[in-house]
Image (spheres, grey):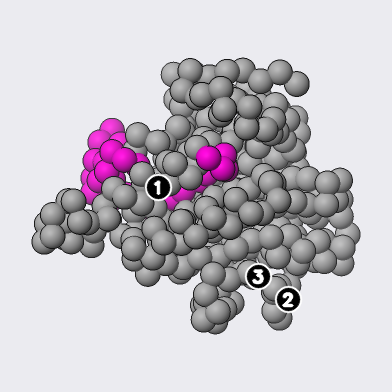
Amino acid sequence: MSRAWTADESALDLFARRPVRGFRTGLRFMDDAVIGASMASATVPLSARGDADSSGYQPRQVVEISGDDATPKLLVLLHVVATFLVRSGDREGGHERVYLFDHECDASAPLLFRIVCAKLRARGVDISTAKERARRALERVTLYRCRDTFQWLATLNQLHFELLEATPAPFLLAFHTVGSFQPIDKMVAKSVGDGLALVDQVFVLLKQFIHLHSPFVFATKTTSGAARNGWDTAEFMPRSWSSQVDKRIQLRCGQPPKSEAPRITLFESRSFWQGKSCISTVQVDGLELIEAETESKVPIQTDPPASLALLESDTNAADLWMQ
């Protein structure tokens, strides 16, 4: 397979870059940003989408999922993680790994387990086999819960050296949320000066990390304040981050239908593909994401196991990870 030589890489980069399949999330409102609405809304069922080919998200692309506190950013992110974990099935032994930085301590192992099970069930896997495969899949997830930017910086640096010694395999880097430490970092910068603060250092390291290791990168970002034209809000992240973002998926809450139960919520998603705005309406029913243009639903009814063998960055994080 031939590899195109991009303008921003050296000959060594071209030689080192391995051909990697593109990644589709299986969520039409997410895939609109890379393959367009016409291809993303093909006849393939919503729950079964996500099989990778030459199209879709590519390594080194940084995807930002933004919205206010009311939007289900974490649920969307976990759906992306689940699709990535099961995209190879048993054909390649499931080598994909996920490194999840949960700065808000919101992620739940049972929640991710149930979503992974649902993805497998949608592919025709029986429930007992789905549970076993989901357990094995979650063993390939490493969770980090950093307390501040300094620990985040140190953890990224440590992960860099671990990956240098590890067997090469596709991996996804996920952040929830990327701007968690921004307010306190700004206060520190005012006190000690920008030169000693860590406002930009972590994102400079992240850029180098992405360039060297070529991960898929998905990050959530919480927005605040009034949105211009209903969508755009003022950017509060430093340019060292915003300049890296390749695709932006914006979420905003909609009003649930009066005839529906209170637990049903709606949100809208906006992305851009070839200069065109793609707006989708998505319904949240429990852990399900039901897109307006499809009748396909993924019933998530499996019970989570009593314990899951997840890798942890901190031995004290197990109690936080399990609910």
Vertical position of residue 25 compared to residue 108: above or below: above
User: Percent from the top left, x then y, of residue 22?
Assistant: 66, 33
Q: What residue is pinned by disc 1?
A: 205
Vertical position of residue 37 compared to residue 128: above or below: above
Q: Are marks 1 and 2 in contact (CB under 8 Å)?
A: no
Q: What residue is pinned by disc 2?
A: 305
Q: Are marks 3 and 1 in contact (CB under 8 Å)?
A: no
- Closer-to-camera residue (320/304): 320
- Closer-to-camera residue (305/212): 212
Within 10 Å of the Cα at label 1, are there few (<14), some (14-19), or many (20+) other Cα atoms? Answer: some
Q: Are marks 3 and 2 in contact (CB under 8 Å)?
A: no
Within 10 Å of the Cα at label 2, are there few (<14), some (14-19), or many (20+) other Cα atoms? Answer: few
Q: What residue is pinned by disc 3?
A: 310
Q: Residue at x 80, y 55 (%)?
A: 121
Would residue 298 be visible to someone looking at this image?
A: no
Q: Is residue 159 rendered magenta in the image? A: no
- Disc 3 marks which amino acid? Leu
Judge from the rendering whether residue 74 lies leftward or rightward of residue 50; answer left or right: left
User: Percent from the top left, x then y, of residue 281?
Assistant: 51, 39
Spatial separation of the CA atoms under disc 3 and disc 2:
12 Å
- Give whichever of discs 3 and 1 has the lower sequence position: 1
- Give whichever of discs 3 and 2 has the lower sequence position: 2
Disc 3 secondary structure class: loop
Residue 126: image quadrant is: bottom right
Q: Which mark is residue 315?
A: none
User: Percent from the top left, x then y, of residue 278?
Assistant: 49, 28
- Give whichever of discs 1 and 2 has the lower sequence position: 1
What residue range appears in magenta?
212-241
